[in-house]
């Protein structure tokens, strides 16, 4: 039975994407179809509870606060001064400030713990500075995306915090 559901949802996703629907909505609609096949209409009640418990998690409150911190750094001019100092230090290295982006993302991720918040926060600070120094936008975004993925790998990641919280809940 599982293979029929997989086949139907795959066909739905491909058909919706080929018709021009955005990928997240096409995948979401296919997921709703699978929920209906697995649990009928009662599966939709569980879907609401799962969505609520995920969105009301206290660990997700860190994300907007780190983005706010990046905006404060940008508006205060600290980001510009940081990149000015780093440009002088890494002038002779291949990639220069692009390597600084990855290192900065690694350091920020070790504090923040979230890949999305790391990429958004450092992107807010770094991209205007890299544009001023005539770096290619695609390469700049690529270095920030690569560095941003370090957020899930370096403790304390939000995923690790959730796992510890779940383990503590199960043990008590």
Image (cartoon, grey):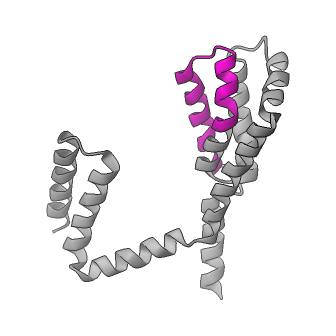
- Residue 93 visible? The answer is yes
Query: Considering depth in this image, is 166 or 69 the residue closer to the camera?
Result: 69
Residue 117 sits above or below residue 165 on the image: above
Is 140 part of what is drawn in magenta? Answer: yes
Q: Where is residue 140 in the image (x, y as percent from the top left)?
A: 60, 25
Residue at x 74%, y 36% (from the top left corner): 104
Query: Considering depth in this image, is 10 or 129 the residue closer to the camera?
Result: 129
- Report which quarter residue 35 is drawn in: bottom left
User: Seen in the image, is 139 located left or right of residue 155?
Assistant: left
Q: Give the range drawn in magenta.
A: 123-151
Q: Where is residue 106 in the image (x, y as percent from the top left)?
A: 71, 40
Is 83 part of what is drawn in magenta? Answer: no
Residue 116 sits above or below residue 163 on the image: above
Q: Where is residue 51 in the image (x, y as percent from the top left)?
A: 43, 71
Identify the residue at the far bottom of this view. Answer: 172
Residue 87 sits above or below residue 76 on the image: above
Residue at x 63%, y 36% (from the top left corner): 123
């Amino acid at each position: 039975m599982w293979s029929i559901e997989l086949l139907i949802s795959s066909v739905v996703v491909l058909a919706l994407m080929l018709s021009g629907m955005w990928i997240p909505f096409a995948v979401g609609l296919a997921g709703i179809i699978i929920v209906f096949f697995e649990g009928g209409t009662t599966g939709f009640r569980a879907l609401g509870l799962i969505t609520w418990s995920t969105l009301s998690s206290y660990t997700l409150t860190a994300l907007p606060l780190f983005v706010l911190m990046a905006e404060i750094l940008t508006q205060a001019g600290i980001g510009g001064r940081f990149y000015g100092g780093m440009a002088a230090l890494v002038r002779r290295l291949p990639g220069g400030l692009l390597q600084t982006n990855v290192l900065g993302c690694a350091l920020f991720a070790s504090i923040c713990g979230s890949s999305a918040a790391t990429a958004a926060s450092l992107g807010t600070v770094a991209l205007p500075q890299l544009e001023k120094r005539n770096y290619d936008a695609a390469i700049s975004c690529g270095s920030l995306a690569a560095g941003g993925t370090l957020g899930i790998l370096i403790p304390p990641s939000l995923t690790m915090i959730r796992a510890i919280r779940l383990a503590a809940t199960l043990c008590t």
